[in-house]
Image (tube, rainbow, N blue to C red):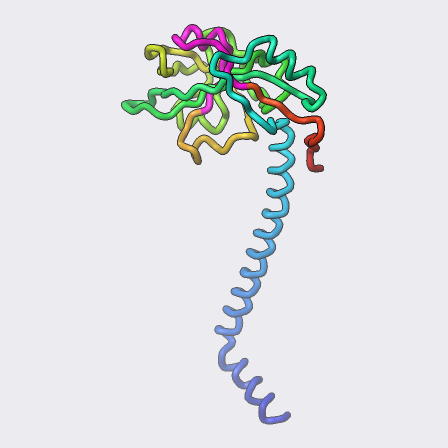
Amino acid sequence: MKPRWAKVAGDLRSERGRLLLMLVAVAVSLAAIGTVLGSWAILTRDIASNYLGTAPAEATLEFEGGVSDEVLTRARADQAVSVADRREVIAGRVRVGDDFRPLLLFVPERFETMRLNTFRPLDGAWPPPAGTVLLERSGLEMANATMSSSLRVKLPNGRPSTVTVSGLVHDPGLAPAWQERTVYAYATPETVAMLGESPTLHELRVQFASHPRTVVE
């Protein structure tokens, strides 16, 4: 055996523990890299599919006096528009213990006929009865709530009021509630009026015919 190979063999015999540790470290590193790459491939595909599956609006126009029936009809009749809906988003607060946390209240015109920025029911009522709200599932812990819990909410123009959680939804178009530190809730215009806020829907959301959305398979 050549001297260099004799030295290598001797080193391996004398440092068997270090060699074994090195091999284990390399194996663990390769497994970790494979896991990360596999997770990245799955997440990039599934996140895109989930998000596009909500039919996200390509433009949102805000009307100071609200989106009238005439404006909605004209938007839907426009050949450049493939889908048009009206909606409202109200920033409020919800009491959790001794603190008030940010609340985003999403108000579709009708839950049964949503076509843009959709979300799906998971449990409970659909649509929510008047005086109740649906919670995004990631917001349960943020709101310290469960099904049928009572929430104390305050909207900009209303007084603190109590509403009941009547159901849960999943909204893939939103960041998790714990990430944004915001509770997401969903209610009908009737419930909004009961909370002291105007039930007028100020947002016109549209998708354009020239840029159709497709779900990634």
The magenta segment is 184-203
Of the pair 9 and 112, the residue shown nearer to us:
112
In the image, taking residue 113 as reference, residue 18 lies left or right, namely left
Residue at horizontal 57%, vertical 52%? Answer: 36
Q: Quadrant of residue 26?
A: bottom right
The image shows residue 114 at horizontal and vertical percentages of 61, 17
Of the pair 26 and 198, the residue shown nearer to us:
198
Is residue 99 magenta-colored? no
Count the marks. 0
The image shows residue 115 at horizontal and vertical percentages of 64, 20
User: Where is 33 relative to 112, above or below?
Assistant: below
The image shows residue 44 at horizontal and vertical percentages of 61, 43
Residue at horizontal 41%, vertical 11%? Answer: 163
In the image, taking residue 108 as reference, residue 154 lies left or right, namely left
Q: Quadrant of residue 143?
A: top left
* Residue 72 shows in the view: yes
* Quadrant for the N terminus in the image: bottom right
Q: Quadrant of residue 210?
A: top right
* Residue 125 shows in the view: no
Residue at horizontal 38%, vertical 20%? Answer: 92
The image shows residue 152 at horizontal and vertical percentages of 35, 15
In the image, taking residue 193 as reference, residue 112 lies left or right, namely right
User: Where is 111 relative to 12, above or below?
Assistant: above
In the image, taking residue 164 as reference, residue 117 lies left or right, namely right
Of the pair 41 and 147, the residue shown nearer to us:
41
User: Where is 35 relative to 76, above or below?
Assistant: below
Residue at horizontal 41%, vertical 23%? Answer: 103
